[in-house]
Image (cartoon, rainbow, N blue to C red):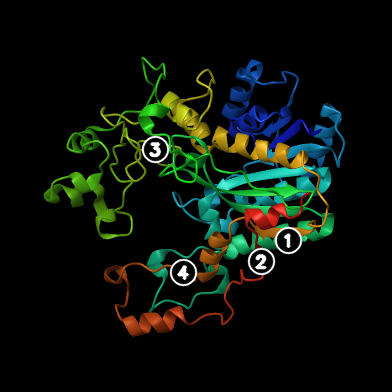
Amino acid sequence: MSNIKNLISLFSGALGLDLGLEKAGFVLKAAVECNQFALQTIKDNNKRLKSQKHVIIDQTLSLQNVGEVCEEILLKTRLTNSGRYVLAGAPPCQPFSTAGKRASLKDSRSCGFQIFLEAVKILRPKFFVIENVKGILSAAKKHRPLAERGPGFPKLTSDEEHGSAFKQLLDDFDELCHDIGYCVSWGLLNSADFGAPQVRERVIFIGSLDGYFIWPEPTHSKDGSNGTKKWVILKTGLKGVKDPNPAYNEFNKEISDYLKLIPEGSNWRALPKNLQSKAIGAAYKSWGGRSGFLRRLSWDKPAPTITNNPKTKATMLCHPTEIRPLSVRECARLQKFPDEWKFSGSLAAQYRQIGNATPVVLGEAIGRAIKKVENIRNNGCHRKKLYCADPILLSRIIKRPKTMLNPPRMRKIIDAEKTKVWLNSGTNKRVDFEKYEAMGPTEAAAGFE
């Protein structure tokens, strides 16, 4: 049986990841969070956690104080470094999110990864888990706006290429593997594949001192193939929600009038042609005029990714049959929080905590995989290794273009040949992902007896 049971949480938020790990059998011993509303949420739900004696540290983590915080954690939990516990966290994702301004590694919050890795070096847990947004895969060290790319503008630098920020993170993980002996696997997990009524892809890093990590096996799929169940649809996911007075921020009258013309499962494209341009503004002629604008959800499909604000025009989560965004309680259910879980603060603060959280089912799936690996004898031949758990994903990253351009109609110079020359200019050496390895489940399992 597994002898790892304790959990330390950094960047804890509303404890979505940690709740999942607790469901898998771990016990939260310490949580570190600086947001006043998330801290209150943790305190308000104390009785709903396995251990009511866990340590809550109100601290803004930085590279300057991470050592002191780690020392405080060990002192108050009576754990030791190099301990048999899991260190888990979801560093701030805004620098890498495609829903906001992508400042990437220029953003001070992006050092959350460096802070977490520094904590790993100090604490040396048996396992660690990091969750982040899918956008991190393509984020650049230096963001250049789309409107400033293409012929007529300076050539692209290597720091502005797709994935240059992610490549830096992989280099940091690679160094961790060789310096301490971790095996670190990374890849994408979709919450819908594990029973959440929400399509939400997240990048996951899992570090193990035992060698290759066998990734969680999906229990669901879009079509229910290979012995899995079909994705859970919205109607099923929200069944039984007790929300007689749903809490939400109302749409303004203009948005409400548009939504009255949009049927269930549709978006701005269902509006009469003469209204579409006015309804979504400048996005009508840009990359932005896609499925998220003025979107009304469908009862018969999983919800799209739950965001920090379900009423924004571009990432709207309108109720299938009512003229309102999904309520706080409905969003929490789609993230698989317990119905009795309380969220502190204003409506905006509650939505933010829910939208930033890791779906509970992902934490549980990862936790169960850790438990499973702990119960298998490892021959120890796979340490000091960084690999992608999905060979197809790594292949896509290697083959993708080094940047994205606006549609021709939006470029400064509309000339195919000049565009080709510009794309081929810049650094001769592209961001190199080919040095990294991928390992499918069968190969990863070869490290165990």
Tags 3 and 4 in contact by the CB under 8 Å rule? no
Frontmost of labels 4 and 2 is 2
**Residue 84 or residue 57, whichever sits in front:** 84
* Mark closer to the chain start, 4 or 1: 1
Horizontal and vertical percent position of residue 210:
80, 48
The residue beneath circle 4 is: 403
* Amino acid type, mark 2: Tyr
Mark 3 and mark 4 lie on one chain; the one further toward the N terminus is: 3
Position in image of residue 353 (x %, y %): 53, 32
Please identify the quadrant where the N terminus is shown. Answer: top right
Left or right relative to 75: residue 369: left
Q: Which mark is residue 174?
A: 1
Separation of disc 1 and disc 3 at Cα?
36 Å
Residue for badge 3: 302
Q: Is residue 419 visible?
A: yes
Whole-angstrom CA distance, mark 3 to mark 4, is 31 Å
On residue 436, the disc is 2
Three-letter amino acid code of the residue under disc 1:
Asp
**Callout 3, which amino acid?**
Pro
Does dot 3 land on a helix, a strand or a loop?
Answer: loop
* Contact? badges 4 and 1 (CB < 8 Å): no
Q: Residues within 10 Å of mark 2 (few under 14, many from 20)?
A: some
